[in-house]
Amino acid sequence: MADRLITDLDTVRRMAASRWEEFNSLREAIEFDGTLSDTALDTLIDSLYERVAAQIDCTQCANCCRTLDVCLVPDDIPRLSAALHISPDEIVTRHADQERGAEQDEWAIIPVHPCPLLAGNLCSIYEHRPHACRVYPQLTPEFRYNMEDAVEGAASCPIIYNVLSALADRIEPLPHDEEAAAEDDDWADEDWVDEEDAG
């Protein structure tokens, strides 16, 4: 795996886009695979994650801090207040957009990109960073049910991309045959018409 890790962001974006269909087919295969338990799958993902993350220095990237929404929970506010030496109310006013957060089913988000707490490639308040930043990129538990988010995140994060790539080497994705899919759709349409005619 070490020889094949991709860390250049432009290459990660390009490869994630070119492999999106493959990763999505992999997601479908995993979603419907009854032979690998959720626990076994999470254990496999944790193992792949540990090997990949050990070889990638996030401080050389910081793409998540530049491009992704930083979601906030109420417990983040006292930590941010302590780190920035301003009141919790001022933290909420300046850094917590609750309306945009609600649109994403989150308590609040930091409303600007890049994150205003980013200094170069480092978090200026690392010890007090928000919960979402502490766990990113969180692939487990329940990878099987969160894999859609991982596929979407592959273009933004070298760790996610390389974990999915390593996983694809181990699990056979469902074949994606557009012609067969079109035939299935046609058959379903015909079946629907026949049922209507019979009724």
Image (cartoon, helix red, strand yellow):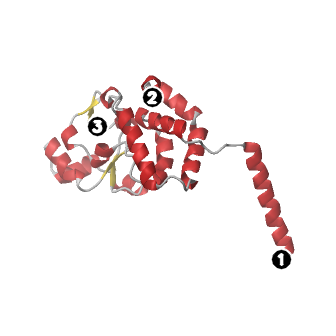
Q: Dot 1: what SS?
A: loop
Q: Nearer the viewer, residue 139 or 107?
A: 139
Q: Nearer the viewer, residue 57 or 124?
A: 57
Q: Dot 3: what SS?
A: loop
Residue picked out by circle 1: 199
Judged by depth in the image, the label closer to the viewer, 3 or 2, is 2
Q: Nearer the viewer, residue 171 or 12?
A: 171
Which quadrant: the N terminus? Answer: top left
Residue picked out by circle 3: 116
Say whether residue 55 is left or right of residue 13: left
Q: How far across and down, in percent of the image, does residue 29 sit?
A: 58, 49
Q: Dot 2: what SS?
A: loop
Q: How far across and down, in percent of the image, does residue 188 sit?
A: 77, 60
Q: Residues within 10 Å of mark 3 (few under 14, many from 20)?
A: some
Seen as rendered, the residue at the extreme bottom is: 199
Seen as rendered, the residue at the extreme front is: 35
* Residue 72 visible in the displayed image: yes
The answer to which of marks 3 and 2 sits earlier in the sequence is 2
Tell me, yes or no, whether the two marked residues, 3 and 2, touch with CB atoms within 8 Å: no
Q: Residues within 10 Å of mark 1 (few under 14, many from 20)?
A: few
| Residue at 67% in and 43% down | 175
**Amino acid marked by disc 3:** Pro
Seen as rendered, the residue at the extreme right is: 197
Q: Which mark is residue 99?
A: none
Q: Is residue 24 above or below residue 73?
A: above
Q: Is residue 196 above or below residue 129?
A: below
The answer to which of marks 1 and 2 sits earlier in the sequence is 2
Say whether residue 135 is left or right of residue 146: left
**Amino acid marked by disc 2:** Met
Say whether residue 124 is left or right of residue 70: left
Judged by depth in the image, the label closer to the viewer, 3 or 1, is 1
Q: How far across and down, in percent of the image, does residue 81 sit?
A: 17, 48
